[in-house]
Amino acid sequence: MSNGFIFYRGPSMLDGSPIIAVATGLDRGSRNGKTGGELIQTWILRDDMAPHDAVKTGADAAICGDCPHRGRVEDGRNVARSCYVVPHQAPLSVWRTAQRGVYPVIDPCDAADAFAGRLVRLGSYGDPAAVPADVWACVLAGVAGKTGYTHQWKTPRFAALKAFCMASCDTPEDQREASADGWRTFRVRLDGEALHDREITCPASAEAGAKTSCDACKACGGLTAKARVNIAIIAHGAASKVNAFARLRAA
Ligand code: SF4
């Protein structure tokens, strides 16, 4: 079997466009300093269009919804994008492999066997809300842990994702609103912004001394994770992305 499979092929729950959800990293070889070494990655991609073309045209709304980090399309190009995922790198590679028919399409409940006992990242690219919540419930039934983040928490029909995902929050106000609505939250903050009550710094962050990785921590798994606190991290990554986040906050 290939080192991946498609566990959902169908309409996006965000806008009805054709999408796929692909799992990779099944051979336990997926290494990343922050997320750790045992992670299964999942990629939520348009089925009918390469990821970088979707970003250029705004068709990435099918897999990212109204996430503010998508940027916006002006004069045929995307401007002000602050998402840290580079669509023509790993997402394009996974999409091309899927379009060549390398990945088998399997039933989500069969995917659960491959996921059992592993840590799964919901949406290494793409918002988990694009995939039906009952698909996630099935594939995640036996996992040892998961991390997931959604920007769609303001939309009531995605409330079932509270079980698996953190509400992605870009402002202090959003964090308070999402928390009041019953979500656990993951907030990106500006350097110098204070932590809120019941909020801790991500222990894998630079400001916390990079003490652990996601596969050891497992805190960002929504309401079904053992952790009960909310998480915050200072905007990080390439200077261009940090500056884009600061501009987003100032807008
Ligand atoms: S709080 Fe834990 S699970 Fe969440 S991002 Fe940080 S290290 Fe990963």
Image (tube, rainbow, N blue to C red):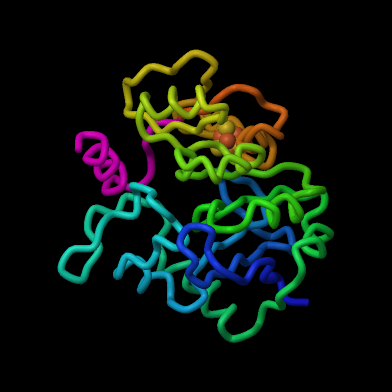
Query: Is 159 placed left or right of 57 in the picture?
Result: right
In x, y percent, where is residue 115? 77, 56
Assign the magenta stretch its main secondary structure. Answer: helix
Quarter of the picture containing the C terminus is: top left
In x, y percent, where is residue 62? 44, 63
- Split into quadrants, the picture shows ligand 1 in the one at top right
Magenta part of the protein: which range? Answer: 233-251
Query: What residue do we see at 60% from left, 51% from top?
Result: 122
Query: Is 130 placed left or right of 41 in the picture?
Result: left
From the viewer's side, name the closer residue of 147 and 20.
Answer: 20
Picture layout, residue 137 above or below residue 203? below
Query: Farthest bottom residue?
Result: 100
From the viewer's side, name the closer residue of 228 and 85.
Answer: 228
Verify whether residue 246 appears in magenta: yes
From the viewer's side, name the closer residue of 138 and 219.
Answer: 138
Query: Is 191 placed left or right of 231 in the picture?
Result: left
From the viewer's side, name the closer residue of 46 and 97.
Answer: 46
Query: What residue do we see at 37% from left, 35% from top?
Result: 170
Query: What residue do we see at 42% from left, 54% from top?
Result: 65
Picture layout, residue 4 above or below residue 150? below
Q: How many marks?
A: 0
Query: Is 52 placed left or right of 162 in the picture?
Result: left
Query: Farthest top residue?
Result: 197
Query: What residue do we see at 37% from left, 67% from top?
Result: 59
Which image quadrant for residue 207? Answer: top left
In x, y percent, where is residue 150? 51, 44
Quarter of the picture containing the N terminus is: bottom right
In x, y percent, where is residue 52? 37, 70
Verify whether residue 239 appears in magenta: yes
